[in-house]
């Protein structure tokens, strides 16, 4: 998962969590336990996927390694290709305008900084 900690090494993490976003439910799985988190699923499919990521990461109460699974190719591409530049550019796009859903992206990055 790419966040603001892209290159930082893993620091003694012992919990591995799988975060799967489907519709309006995020399933968190760790070892043999799982938990479902329901979230607001209004908006575009990309917004719903991003809201799901934020809801899932917010539900984690310990620092851990997170593996994200989602079916939004747009969000995956954004995380891999655009998000690093947005972080470096203060969440401004190439036109100097704030990126769409900047507040959600900022929250996602902030939450990611708590996990690997």
Image (spheres, rainbow, N blue to C red):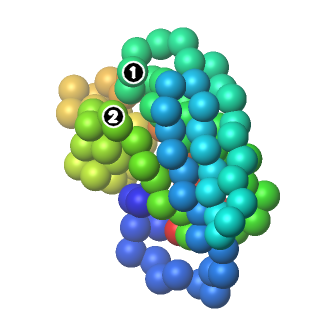
Residue under the point 69% across and 40% down: 36
- Looking at the image, which is closer to me, 52 or 35? 35
Q: Is residue 86 above or below residue 65?
A: above
Q: Are marks 2 and 1 in contact (CB under 8 Å)?
A: yes
Crowding near the residue tagged with mark 1, few <14, some 14–19, many ≥20 C-alpha atoms within 10 Å: some
Q: Name the residue under label 2.
A: 72
Residue under the point 72% across and 60% down: 33
Total marks placed: 2
Q: In which quarter of the image is the N terminus?
A: bottom left
Q: Is residue 86 above or below residue 39?
A: below
Where disc 2 sits, the SS reads: loop
Q: Name the spot of residue 17 as percent of width and height, x first.
A: 60, 63
Check residue 45 in the rendering and tell me which mark sits there, or answer none.
1
Residue under the point 59% across and 84% down: 11
Q: Name the spot of residue 52 as percent of width and height, x first.
A: 55, 34
Q: In the figure, is residue 75 to the left or right of 106?
A: left
Where disc 1 sits, the SS reads: helix
């Amino acid at each position: 998962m790419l966040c603001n900690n892209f290159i930082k090494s893993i620091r003694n993490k012992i919990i591995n969590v799988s975060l799967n976003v489907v519709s309006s439910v995020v399933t968190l799985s760790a070892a043999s336990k799982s938990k479902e988190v329901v979230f607001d699923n209004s908006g575009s499919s990309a917004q719903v996927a991003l809201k799901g990521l934020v809801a899932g990461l917010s539900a984690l109460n310990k620092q851990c390694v997170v593996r994200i699974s989602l079916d939004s190719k747009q969000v995956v591409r954004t995380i891999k290709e655009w998000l690093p530049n947005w972080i470096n550019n203060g969440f401004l796009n190439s036109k100097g305008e704030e990126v769409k859903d900047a507040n959600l992206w900022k929250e996602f990055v902030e939450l990611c900084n708590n996990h690997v």
